Image: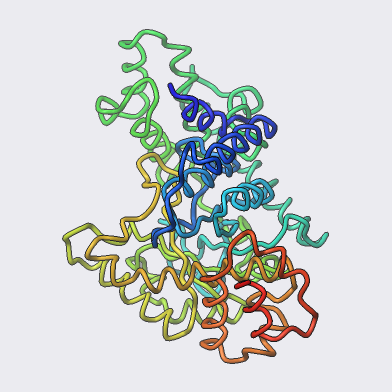
Amino acid sequence: MSNIEQLEQQLDDFSPTRRHEALTALATAAHAGKHPLPAPGVAHNLHAHTFFSYNAYGYSPSRFAWLARKAGLALGGIVDFDVLDGLEEFQAARRLLDLPGTIGMETRVFVPEFEQWVINSPGEPGVAYTMGIGFPRRQIPADAEKFMASLRCTAEQRNRDLLTRVNAFMAPVALDYEKDVLPLTPAGNATERHICLAYARKAQRQFPDAVSLKKFWIEKLGSDAEKVDLPEGAKLENLIRAKTMKKGGVGYVQPSPTSFPTLTDFNKFVLACEAIPTLCWLDGTSDGEQRIEELLRVFQQSGGAALTIIPDRNYKPGVQDQKLKNLCHIVDIAQKLHLPITVGTEMNSPGNKFVDSFETVELRPLVPVFLRGAHIVYAHGALQREAGKGYLSAWAKQNYPNIAERNAFFEQVGKVLRPSREAALAALPQNATPAQILAAVTK
């Protein structure tokens, strides 16, 4: 293993000090020409989960920033469930590596107006995945901090209750949340995927020989377990989750309207944090997403201002199917409503790509739209953090009441701004004009 590879692995250490040391060494080598980094292209990923919620490859914010820069991504962004734990680390890493980027937070919400329809959380009417993007800083108002803490607390209790139900089914393999699950996380924010991994590892310890281990999993998960990758791996973990934690599984409990915050309350939280409320789009096949124009009206009425898509779920190369039509349809609608679109691959499930295949016939025509959204949210984060002049600020609304013109300005800033110039925005006068901002970022 080369020194570079060793340092890259160290980027995923649970010790912040170890991660910082590794990133500094890698950046130093790159700046000295010992490990040249490519010029940025058009590919980007603004929806990468990190190990602060769950990343299938164990990537920390620093690891993602380094790999994004190493791959020549135009921009990079992280999104974690219910926490902003990776914000400061990612901000420092991308600045060190000269990587434009942004930070988001994802959660599930209840949408009362759509309580009879499945939206983008399969089998769960009224429940939707949504997020905020472009969080400028980790320091947020006290009320927002309490709201975020409640999200984390509710998620943990949901995990513990789930564990109790699944443990009864998995006997004699039973997990201890503190001993078996939490050590898999750097900051205690466990997810269902961490629990699946913990079950795989606990079963291996309890059944060390391959024959008895396979017998155990076939007994618990059925004949599908004959085809999984033992002792642990993507297929096994996905099967555990599907058979025990999703609808129809022994651990699943149908959520009620009080299981999650409302869309309105979450959007209020995002706005209080000076970020952009962003609706997640799945693939347009659900009853709720087939009513997308009505859903977007509800979303915008509660402060929503952007859309995020996972393109890889929406097409198969070389196939002109309904999902691809749905993708093109939602992009058309978003453009008519002047909603910036951001995209990414999540990487919270084994097998997810590092970055979308923007060169494919299906995605190539959409790249300018996706890049525009990426530049807008990058410019928002920098301008809001440094000068209080983000996309939804009073300054933006006064100077650009027309959303199309506002999008054009923030896209222009995002295109030319580099991390090394972000701090210069802090010197702008309170009544700075758009021209002064552009001058500050292009010097």
What residue sits 52% from the left and 34% below the top?
194
Q: Nearer the viewer, residue 54 or 1?
A: 1
Residue at the spot x=23%, y=57% of the render? 316
Looking at the image, which residue is at 58% across and 59% down?
102
Q: Position of residue 199 (x, y in %)?
A: 48, 26
131 to 19, vertically: above or below: below
Quarter of the image where one finds residue 15: top right
Q: Which quadrant of the rendered structure holds the C terminus?
A: bottom right
Residue 331 x/y as whole percent: 37, 75
The extreme front residue here reads 32
**In the image, what residue occupies the spot 35% across and 29% down?**
221
Image height of 424 relative to 305, above or below: above
Rendered position, 405 above or below 234: below
Decide if residue 270 is on the left or right side of residue 40.
right
Query: What color scheme is it?
Result: rainbow
Quadrant into which the N terminus falls: top left
- Residue nearer the viewer, 414 or 48: 414
Q: Is residue 55 above or below residue 173?
A: below
Residue 394's quadrant in the figure? bottom right
Q: Residue furthest right?
A: 142
Is 322 left, or right, of 218 in this rendering? left
Query: Residue 402: percent from the left, percent from the top?
Result: 57, 91
Q: x, y percentage for residue 138?
A: 73, 55
Judged left or right of residue 386, residue 29 is left
- Asked whether, in this view, residue 322 is left or right of residue 299, the answer is left
Q: Is residue 119 visible?
A: no
Residue lying at the far top in this picture: please name it.
209
* 245, 35: nearer the viewer: 35
Disc count in the image? Answer: 0
Q: Foreground residue, 380 or 317?
A: 380
Residue 279 seen from this side: yes
